[in-house]
Amino acid sequence: MKMPLKKVSLGSRVQEIVEEEEEEEEEEPSLLDLPELALECILERLSPDGLCSMAGVCSSLRDRCRSDHLWERHLTQKWGRVIGESAHKKLQWHIASSRRPSLLDRRNQKGFIGSLISTWPFCWFKPKCESRRKPTTCLPVDSIMALYLSLESGKFSFPAQVYNRENGHVGFMLSCYDAQLSYDSKTDTFQARYPPFARQAIEQSIHWERLRAPPVDTPAHVLHATDCLNDLKPGDHIEIQWRRSKEFHYGWWYAVVGHQELCDGNENRCRCQHNDAVVLEFSQYTPGSRWRQTMISRKDHREAGNEADGFYGGIRKLYKAEEISKWKQLWPNQIFD
């Protein structure tokens, strides 16, 4: 028995197939179709997380999203207050010692950049680079984005200074000490290692408000060259180097220039500014305390002190209102003996 043949319109079916293929070929509007200025405004408003996510869309956006000018703003806003000249020098040393210009060449990369690959959560670029024979589009280690990500990962420890070290211990009140810091993004706090590092002096859970970039480029074990002695007068705010003994590094301690013992403090009669001896007051200590006051010489200032009272070093005068205000914010609730 023969089955009845069904009549099919081949012409209409072919037309339907052609129309379906044309619809599939029609592309959705792309972000890259926007005017250059509009696209740039969108990228500038993205957070670091957003830039990393956007960079995974395509190669064109990847190149745009890792541009230095986009990351410079994020770096300055979050890290500018604690990243100083010494930190930049350390970064440059790491960059110069890297064997490869690529952040993602895991076979040859060492140090904090290499460690970053396995720890940073926004490794949107790794599959693309590793899936190609020549990883020519990987992130350069000398880019600002690479610096930002390495800081966030905590694998790059950097030099900075910590106010009131050891969680505000009485023995360090109103001081600021050099340390190597590493960041913990989970808690938004820092770990500090204080020199000399052989002693393993480590402090955890340090908040941002207790940090600053070193204001002068003087290593912690070096006497600072003082250039303000002739300008010091009563009421001036200063920081002075002090160390407990010669085997320790210096910390910076806050003090105010005081009046001579025989001066009544009257501005019209005060001649303290013209006296060779300069009185420094540490008002966090009670009057009569051996830590309350010390004197230095304008003409022959050098490290002075002894093993009982410690050693006083270089001085820097505070001119900026924000520096003085910061010390006042750290002022203890009570004075000490």
Image (cartoon, rainbow, N blue to C red):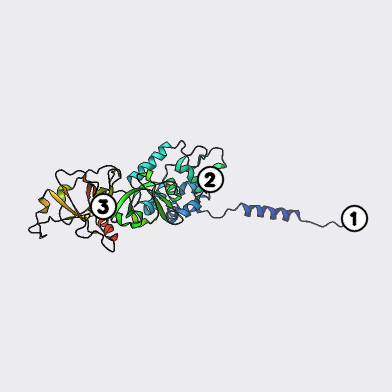
Question: What is the secondary structure assignment of the residue under circle 3?
Answer: strand
N-terminal of the pair, mark 3 or mark 1, is 1
Label 3 belongs to which residue? 253
Q: Quadrant of the N terminus?
A: bottom right
What percent of the width, then of the height, locates residue 311?
24, 46
In the image, residue 251 above or below residue 105: below
Q: Judge the density around disc 3: few (<14), some (14-19), many (≥20) Cα neighbours within 10 Å.
A: many
Nearest-to-viewer mark from 3 and 1: 3
**Residue 2 bears which disc, if any?**
1
Q: Residue furthest front?
A: 308
Horizontal arrangement in the rendering, residue 265 relative to residue 323 (left or right): left
Q: Residue furthest bottom?
A: 333
Question: What is the secondary structure assignment of the residue under circle 2?
Answer: helix
Given residues 77 and 335, the one toward you in this image is 335
Amino acid beneath label 1: Lys
Label 2 belongs to which residue? 126
Given residues 54 and 253, the one toward you in this image is 253
The Cα–Cα distance between marks 2 and 3, rounded to whole angstroms, is 47 Å
Amino acid beneath label 3: Trp
Question: What is the secondary structure assignment of the residue under circle 1?
Answer: loop
